[in-house]
């Protein structure tokens, strides 16, 4: 197995698992919460078939990476991303962040100038700010965020099982993914720890990135489903597209949060077209 080394705030090492497949222009895929790098299976296959090098890693606390008790704030997580870029000596890479990972992408630019990145893609982004406040009225209410934390504490598996249905837009008349997929996602999500699951939920729901997002100074593509019940499009994707200079914005009509699976063919095509420009 392949690992890169990052650090905790106390200087101790953290091992981050990654996969590095294919050749050509590097494409770095950063996964969403509460999954790991395996969520990108269909994108990895399509991108490597198209002639690109794909690097996908497990965020600290998830998958095969180390699971420290601390370090789940976006500054530390962006430091982990920098460790990946530095140790793999990546240049002219396309950086793709899904959902929570848009925070790492934004902070990588505001903290490190986006070193080694030539293009950015934000999919179902939580950036610039997911929480509902007086000056962010379209965000998610604090009581909803509080309920997430309380239900994870009550029984993490039960919460994540239900969360997966909302994630993919599963309902009485809508079955965009199978029960087997939901079961697999739950298995992947439960490989994280309670600490990492809770701490990352706090980070993605409450970190205000509005002062950071303009640091993205490379060509950017923002993709969001307008039926996303997990991360409301008006407060996030729509605002991200407006705040990143020159960003291309694609709305997937009627689509939920988990676009990497529910709209995998369209997403793969849009990624390949954007990367190849």
Image (tube, helix red, strand yellow):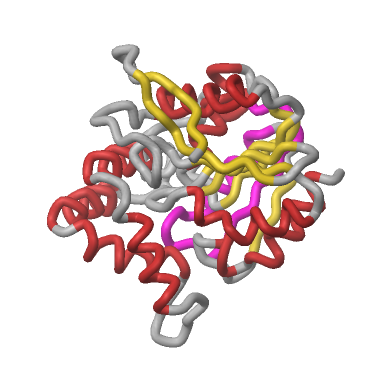
- The vertical placement of 263 against 222, above or below, is below
Q: Nearer the viewer, residue 205 or 185?
A: 185
The segment highlighted magenta reads 216-244
Q: Quadrant of residue 207?
A: top left
- The residue sitting at 24% across, 31% down in the picture is 69
Q: Is residue 16 left or right of residue 26?
A: left
Residue 235 on the magenta span = yes
Residue farthest along the right direction in this orientation: 277
Q: Is residue 105 left or right of residue 163?
A: right
Q: Which x, y percent locates residue 80?
A: 47, 26
- The vertical placement of 79 against 126, above or below, is above
Q: Which x, y percent locates residue 119?
A: 73, 35
- The vertical placement of 54 against 244, above or below, is below
Q: Nearer the viewer, residue 201 or 138?
A: 201
Q: Which x, y percent locates residue 13?
A: 36, 20
Q: Nearer the viewer, residue 97 or 9?
A: 9
- The residue sitting at 34% across, 31% down in the picture is 72
Q: Is residue 164 left or right of residue 198?
A: right
Residue farthest along the top direction in this orientation: 11
In which quadrant will I find the C terminus? top right
- The residue sitting at 22% across, 45% down in the picture is 194
């Amino acid at each position: 197995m392949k690992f890169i080394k990052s650090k905790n705030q106390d200087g101790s090492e953290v091992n981050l698992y990654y996969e590095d497949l294919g050749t050509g222009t590097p494409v770095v895929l950063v996964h969403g919460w509460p999954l790991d790098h395996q969520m990108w299976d269909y994108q990895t296959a399509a991108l490597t078939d198209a002639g690109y090098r794909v690097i996908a890693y497990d965020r600290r606390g998830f998958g095969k990476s180390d699971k420290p008790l601390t370090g789940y704030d976006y500054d530390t997580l962006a430091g982990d991303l920098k460790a990946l870029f530095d140790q793999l000596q990546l240049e002219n890479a396309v950086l793709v962040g899904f959902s929570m990972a848009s925070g790492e992408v934004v902070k990588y630019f505001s903290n490190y100038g986006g070193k080694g990145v030539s293009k950015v893609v934000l999919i179902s982004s939580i950036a610039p700010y997911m929480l509902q406040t007086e000056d962010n009225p379209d965000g998610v209410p604090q009581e909803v965020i509080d309920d997430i934390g309380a239900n994870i504490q009550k029984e993490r598996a039960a919460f994540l099982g239900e969360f997966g249905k909302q994630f993919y837009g599963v309902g009485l008349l809508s079955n965009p993914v199978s029960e087997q997929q939901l079961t697999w996602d739950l298995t992947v999500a439960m490989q994280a720890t309670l600490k990492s699951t809770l701490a990352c939920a706090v980070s993605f729901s409450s970190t205000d990135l509005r002062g950071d997002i303009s640091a993205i100074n490379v060509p950017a593509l923002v993709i969001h489903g307008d039926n996303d019940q997990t991360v409301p499009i008006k407060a996030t994707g729509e605002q991200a597209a407006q705040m990143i200079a020159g960003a291309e914005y694609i709305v997937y009509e009627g689509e939920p949060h988990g676009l990497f699976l529910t709209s995998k063919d369209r997403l793969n095509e849009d990624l390949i077209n954007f990367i190849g420009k």
